[in-house]
């Protein structure tokens, strides 16, 4: 694949600590578009210094803002990249050697998720395969909720998707505090889209211990030590937190 045919798109807001390393990992010769939503730090300046085109854009939730950014891409292919992700050298080489057949509209990549400095293989965190490379204008987004509460969004191409073998590296949680902050933020957002339902709290709470055990042993989180146990516990707790926050919002 000709690098000039691909634009790497990154959404940012106050990502000065991570944007330079992110863009430095992009294969040489590819376009880079940073869609920035009112950063107050040096994100924009650092991105421009790396050769990226920086566009100031309003935030309309994860899904819609991604669509807004992709609408500005002029190359035949788009690669969606998060500021806390890095294109590995292996993936860079695979992309450069890629020769997409006419019938393939998109490619998925496996993602190596790091937690407190360690690559996590259990709890469903590996290979965490996601569609990230697609023909521009030939993919839409589906998400669990709509509007500002659209989370856990995935790209859906309008044609066949093929797998890439080489991974992205995802450095989302350097510390436990990072994880807890994102847990609180995402459960707040998701709860805002749900009606208050006491039965949902009861139902999710009753399933919680079984789900934690399934992630710990059935999905191999136990093999990741204390990190895996923490992830299994919090992942099982997530729907309980969402339901409880939705119920609290309805209280006078």
Image: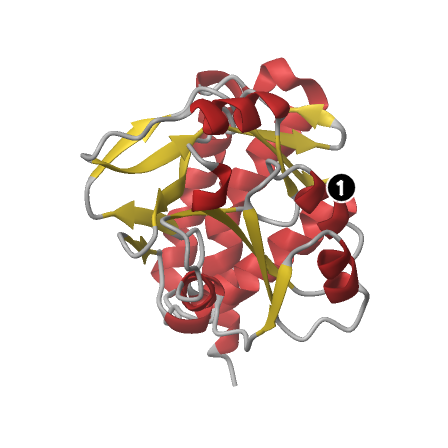
Residue 115 appears at what percent x and percent y? 69, 32
Q: Position of residue 6 (x, y in %)?
A: 46, 45
Residue found at the far top of this picture: 223
Picture quadrant of residue 161: top left
Residue 124 visible at all? no
Q: Nearer the viewer, residue 208 or 19?
A: 19
In this rendering, does residue 96 appear at all?
yes
Residue 194 rendering spot, x and y as whole percentages: 38, 68
Q: Secondary structure at mark 1?
A: helix
Q: Residue at image x 61%, y 62%?
A: 53
Image quarter (top left, top right, bottom left or bottom right) of the N terminus: top left
- Residue 16, quarter of the rendered image: bottom right
Picture layout, residue 97 above or below residue 69: above
Residue found at x 55% / y 50%? 31
Per the image, the residue denoted by label 1 is 176
Residue at 49% in and 28% down: 96
């Amino acid at each position: 694949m000709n690098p000039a045919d691909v634009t790497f798109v990154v959404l940012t807001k106050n990502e000065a600590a991570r944007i330079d390393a992110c863009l430095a990992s992009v294969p040489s010769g590819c376009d880079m578009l940073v869609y920035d939503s009112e950063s107050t730090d040096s994100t924009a300046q650092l991105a421009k210094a790396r050769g990226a085109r920086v566009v100031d854009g309003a935030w309309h939730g994860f899904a819609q803002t991604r669509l807004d950014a992709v609408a500005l891409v002029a190359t035949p292919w788009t690669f969606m990249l998060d500021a806390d992700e890095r294109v590995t050298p292996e993936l860079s080489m695979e992309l450069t050697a890629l020769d997409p057949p006419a019938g393939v509209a998109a490619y998925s990549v496996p993602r190596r998720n790091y937690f407190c400095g360690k690559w996590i293989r259990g709890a469903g965190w590996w290979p965490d395969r996601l569609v990230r490379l697609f023909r521009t204008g030939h993919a839409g987004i589906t998400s669990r909720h709509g509007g500002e509460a659209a989370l856990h969004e995935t790209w859906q191409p309008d044609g066949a998707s093929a797998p890439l073998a080489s991974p992205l590296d995802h450095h989302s949680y350097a510390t436990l505090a990072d994880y807890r902050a994102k847990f609180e933020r995402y459960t707040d957002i998701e709860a805002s889209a749900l009606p208050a339902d006491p039965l949902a709290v009861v139902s999710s709470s009753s399933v919680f211990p079984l789900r934690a055990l399934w992630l710990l042993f059935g999905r191999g989180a136990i093999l990741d030590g204390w990190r895996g146990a923490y992830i299994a516990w919090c992942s099982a707790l997530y729907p309980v937190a969402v339901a409880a926050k939705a119920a609290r919002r309805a209280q006078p």
